Image (tube, helix red, strand yellow):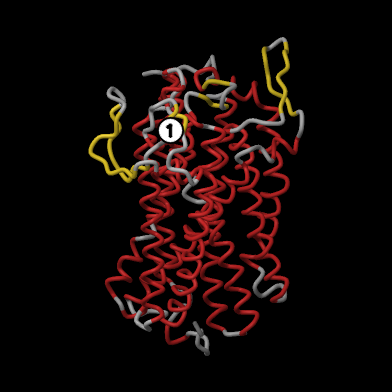
Amino acid sequence: MDGLLLARIQFALTIGFHYIFPPISIGLGVILVIMEARYLRTRNPLHMAMTRFWVRIFGLVFAMGVATGIVMEFQFGTNWASYSRYVGDVFGSALAAEGIFAFFLESGFLGLLLFGWDRVGPRMHFFSTVMVSLGSIFSAVWILVANSWQQTPAGYRLVETPAGTRAEIASFWEVVLNPSTLDRLGHVLVAALQTGAFLVISVSAFYLLKRRHREIAGFSLKLGLAIVLAASVLQLASGHSSAVGVAENQPAKLAAFEGHFEASAPAALHLFGWVDEGTQTVRGGVAIPGGVSWLLSWDPRQPVTGLNAFPPEDRPPVNPVFQSYHAMVAIGMALIGLGLVGVLYWARGRLLETRWLLWIYVFAVALPQAANQLGWFSAEVGRQPWIVYGLLRTEDGLSKVVSAGQTLASLIMFSFVYLLLFILFIYLLDQKIKHGPVDDESKAPEGRARA
């Protein structure tokens, strides 16, 4: 098989599996801050039990994120050594900042978060919860700085060395605040809130269906729904802002998102369809004429740059990007609908007893995860054929000394190990959920959670 394809599949496998966990830890970290603040205000023992339960879940997710994240960085020096040599000064600085300013902060206070309940005062423990949450957010900031620089490079200069051309930092803050950083950061953080909140909603709905831990589950479910509804509205705004940025900085990617081929013409907004690159049409779909033009400029007649403005070798694979992008948007709209329905039943006082809706919430935990993966796929495949947009092609970033056979062998090994890790994660998560927030309903602490 082709070594480039194998290396890309391997990196997609490792980063895709890793990306299951950071959004949960970011979103759940914020929710833990809210839960523990609620306990400090009310001193309700059930709020304490609820917070301690979700801290245990957070610890499991954090451990999985660390175990799967380390692998990706090694690939930069093995499969992608040419890429690392070209952009190491720029890309490496953001990764180093993530370790120094984010990971150490998060992991340093994690011990207090997990084991400090009876060893430090309530306010000190709450401070550790806030620091862990901030650490997870700062980690996302620096990782997104690195990835956003690949999408919209800025603040660099190219220098000639005996080993070849390489990029160096000319302005650190231009690297950090490159044209896509803030839009992508907002989009990812809001998605993480949705991911963490839907995990809380799913487990809470399960408890309500089984008639266990009803006081804790009721409060957790309503808290999760409130966060989901707020995050869904924010996601519409951040998604729009991101699309405007993509249109300005990566027009070929936006054209692939919507299957828009004409070099300069108003672009339709497709709800779904199948892109036929041979005829340059979207088949079997429904489209709003001028919809993309209107969303970008509030003028449905405004021309939008299409794929024909670029040489064929500079275009991303259109149909995979089109399908993943539209599936992500569809899931996003479904999440908004689930949030609105839940709040409606909450207002009517029927939320905790509507079993069909609770069953939907149990399985809806997979939806934000699917949206995260599809969004990442759209962004990364939509950047192709560039590993650093406009500077370095993906094929030129591949290591010259790693053979296709070596990559295939390691890909098989990683697939097997990650399968075992996922089974272990699901098993441990299931055990913690079955155990619940308290050891026994009859021994639950006195007091009731007020929602």
Q: Mark 1: which secondary structure?
A: helix
Q: Is residue 130 depicted above or below 37 in this figure?
A: above
- The residue positioned 41% from the left and 73% from the top of the image is 343
Residue 420 or 146: which is nearer the viewer?
146
Q: Is residue 17 left or right of residue 138?
A: left
Q: Is residue 394 left or right of residue 128?
A: left
Dot 1: few (<14), some (14–19), or many (≥20) neighbours within 10 Å? Answer: many
Residue ranking furthest to the bottom: 446
- The residue positioned 39% from the left and 41% from the top of the image is 290
- The residue positioned 27% from the left and 71% from the top of the image is 356
Q: Is residue 276 depicted above or below 245 in this figure?
A: above
Quarter assignment of residue 354: bottom left
Q: Which residue is mark 1?
A: 255
Residue 18 or 418: which is nearer the viewer?
18
Q: Position of residue 188 (x, y in %)?
A: 54, 50
Residue ranking furthest to the right: 171
Q: Amino acid at mark 1?
A: Ala
Q: Position of residue 45 (x, y in %)?
A: 56, 84
Q: Is residue 152 depicted above or below 296 in this figure?
A: above
Q: Position of residue 313 (x, y in %)?
A: 44, 17
Residue ranking furthest to the left: 284
Residue ranking furthest to the top: 162
Quarter assignment of residue 375: top left
Q: Is residue 53 depicted above or below 367 in this figure?
A: below
- The residue positioned 51% from the left and 43% from the top of the image is 297
* Quadrant that contains the N terminus: top left
